[in-house]
Amino acid sequence: MAYTEPYAADWDALPNVAMPFMNTVHSEELALVSRLLTDLETAAAPATIDAQVAAWVEHTKAHFAREERLMHQYDFFATPCHQGEHETALLQLLGVQQQWLRERDTAMLQDYIQYWREWLQQHIGSMDFVTANFLNQLNVEVELT
């Protein structure tokens, strides 16, 4: 997929789910990626982009680990499927990070951001939606620290 138009970082376009902490985490991640895209568009120094990508990777790891702990803790029925999507997405992100560090290919990173945005919308609307409803029915409360 070729990157052909500016990335629209519109939080309202992302689905919301029944667990506020999940919406907050998604919003944080979108903000991180939006800053990264701005840095790419303004030709920021590679070290700046390196740091933004690293922050994205760390946020994603924490995001997925938190959800997975809750799914296991509450015996969520679709844990293997949901966790499998996380594993695939994280491996892709790590691969993109390594490719960026090797090639410094701005277009590749912009293309991946567009792909990620579409993936995130789909993932929230399916896996996270069902998981959040399950946790909400159990009155699970999660504080982000």
Image (tube, grey):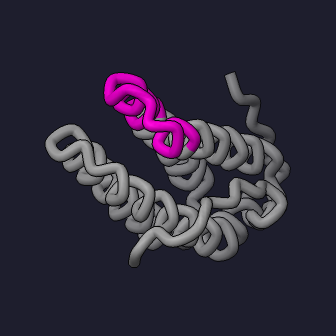
Q: Is residue 13 above or below residue 145?
A: below
Q: Which of the 4 image quadrants contains residue 144?
A: top right
Q: Residue at x 41, y 61 (%)?
A: 112
Q: Is residue 83 above or below residue 72?
A: below
x, y (%) of residue 47? 33, 23
Between residues 26 and 30, which one lies in front from this camera angle? 30
Q: Going by the picture, which residue comes out furthest to the front?
A: 42
x, y (%) of residue 11? 78, 55
Residue 134 visible to the viewer = yes
Q: Which of the 4 image quadrants contains residue 13?
A: bottom right
x, y (%) of residue 34? 61, 44
* Residue 86 placement, left or right of 103: right
Total marks shown come to 0
* Residue 138 placement, left or right of 63: right
Q: Residue at x 56, y 55 (%)?
A: 71
* Residue 28 placement, left or right of 137: left
x, y (%) of residue 62? 49, 36
Q: Residue at x 39, y 60 (%)?
A: 89
Between residues 122 and 65, which one lies in front from this camera angle? 122
Q: In the rendered image, which quarter contains the N terminus?
A: bottom left
Tell me the chief SS of the magenta region: helix
Between residues 5 and 19, which one lies in front from this camera angle? 5
Residue 66 visible to the viewer = no
* Residue 57 placement, left or right of 114: left
Q: Residue at x 59, y 37 (%)?
A: 35
Q: Is residue 43 above or below residue 77?
A: above
Q: Which residues are magenta?
A: 38-55
